[in-house]
Image (spheres, grey):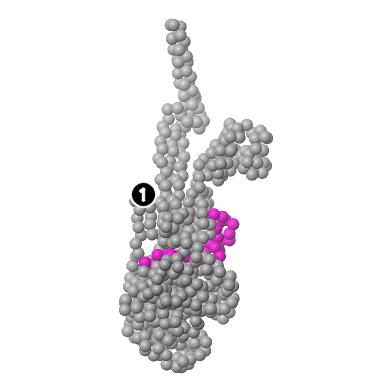
Amino acid sequence: MKWKVRLVFFAFTIWFILIIAKSFYYQVVQGSYSSPFVFTKKQLPERGVIYDRKGEILAENRRVFRLYIDKKKFNGDREEMETLSKMLKIDISSVEAKLDRKGVWISLAKEISLGKKEALESSGIKGLVFEEEFKRVYPESSLSAHVLGFVGKNRLGDSVGYFGVEGYYDKSLQGLSGIVKSQRGGGGLPVLFGVQSVIEAEKGVDLYLTIEKGVQRIVKERLKEGIEMYGAKLGCIIVVDPKTLEVLALSCLPDYDPNYYYKYPKEYFVNYAISNAYEPGSIFKPLIVAAALEEGVIRPDDKVDESGPVRVGDAEINTWDNKYEGEITITRVLERSSNVGMVRIGEKLGKEKIWKYLEKYGFFEKTGIDLQGEAGSIIKPKRNWYPIDYATVTFGQGIAVTPIQMVRAFASLVNGGELLTPYVVYKIDDGSPQTIRRKVDGRVISEKTSKQIRYMLVKAVEKGLVKWRRPEGYAIGGKTGTAQIPIKGRYDPEKTLASFIGFFPAENPRVLAMVMLKEPEASPWGSETAAPIFFKLVKDLIVYYNILPE
């Protein structure tokens, strides 16, 4: 019995000596050539998920893996390389070239699915090392491309959000990286009794958007249909709640699939709703009329002279159809979209107050919408304005604003007079959900003036020169716009930006929408292109939101 005890004791002693010897070898012998060091590895966090208003996923993460080859363990024979080539669908010459590189660990493939990883592990090939990663996935493809943006790579190979919500909230969505520290010997192997520490990565915040997938789909289908029908180069539709300026839907075409953004030209990434300034044309007229009403220089039933063209300096301003009705009311000026009538109203308002209201409507600043890539307006310095500039601005030419700036200003006309900040994220969830509230930036007009201009815009729809197919029983207000596009300092009469901006129900507006088409071939007029799209969209939204007649 004693000899058995001695045998166990002897074996234990030999095992202990081997451990000490191995530790001595790594920490002292190898350490004589290279001192022990702390190996630090970054642990990537999971990016936050993006949901629509109803909790439907718009952007999420798929668990994938990066494959490395540990050359010390990999046999490197031809048969194994051919197996890797077939399973990874990589040319065998590429596999061989990568394995010829210097280093112990060689990156062979990325974005490998869990199923493929398990198949590779079952292949019996030694030296395969997998590192978990997350791939950004957009289940609805291009549905909300310009709202969402995409996740790409920067010059360092790190994942970064570009454009839209992904770009604007990139830091919050990224989360915080973790760190794994381990002490290593000179050979790069873990030290037996070395220090190990882990700081876990923190997942990025989740975002809940103001848009609804269902409304977004309706809007995009109507826009696509309209662009094809009227032969436009591009188009945008923005739908908001005018009382809060929550963006209910936003779509511009052409767009792209964020899952495969690298397959599209860069110009497709531009969100024309927020990144492109243009001359708005006649949809600008209600802003000047409302300013004049607020200042008390006109009343809706006052009359102005539209008996012929009006001369401003060396320029002559005509009506769009070269027809004149003589003395017409202010309301009629909007109904027939009279440029001459608008110049008369501008004269009553005066230069200083025109400039004052450009500022009050927010045209000298960006809207602050929470989407990356917003541009500002293009307005000449005040010192460079001449009488002709004050005349043409009354009907929306001579200045350039973005569609979202136009929507923001127009919403103040119908929501009681408040200038608001538009937004697309209503809730940020980092474990303690934070709800975003509407932000009031100032008051432009009084509630009384707002009520007056709403009534006048309903009349502009009902008694305008073009009769549209409107849903019965609903009072809808709005204004058409047709702006010529300036090219090399001159307006091209054949190239226009056609638009319509409107709201409903008129007494208590729940929806405001703007439709814009660039260079429609079927007709240059907003009344014949953008407006029909708007009224089709209104019918869709009445059904979707179950909005009853007033």
Can you give x and y, in whole percent of width and height, for residue 497 in the image?
52, 75
Residue 197 to residue 16: above or below? below
Residue 184 to residue 291: above or below? above
Magenta span of residues = 244-270
Q: Amino acid at mark 1?
A: Gly
Left or right relative to 202: residue 232: right
Left or right relative to 497: residue 193: left
Q: Residue at x 50, y 69 (%)?
A: 236
Can you give x and y, in whole percent of width and height, for residue 90 in the image?
64, 44
Decide which of 8, 347 is in the foreground and name it: 8
Visible residue check, residue 197: yes
Counting the numbered discs, the total is: 1
Residue 539 to residue 157: above or below? below
Can you give x and y, in whole percent of width and height, for residue 421 in the image?
38, 66
Q: Residue at x 53, y 76 (%)?
A: 529
Specify whether residue 153 is painted magenta. no
Q: Which residue is mark 1?
A: 431
Decide which of 213, 415 is in the foreground and name it: 213
Secondary structure at numbered mark 1: loop
> Which quarter of the picture shows residue 263?
bottom right
Q: Quadrant of the N terminus?
A: top left
Q: Residue at x 36, y 59 (%)?
A: 436
Specify whether residue 253 is painted magenta. yes
Can you give x and y, in whole percent of width and height, for residue 297 in the image?
34, 86
Q: Quadrant of the C terminus?
A: bottom left
> Which quarter of the picture shows residue 405?
bottom left
Decide which of 344, 507 is in the foreground and name it: 507
> Which quarter of the picture shows residue 95?
top right
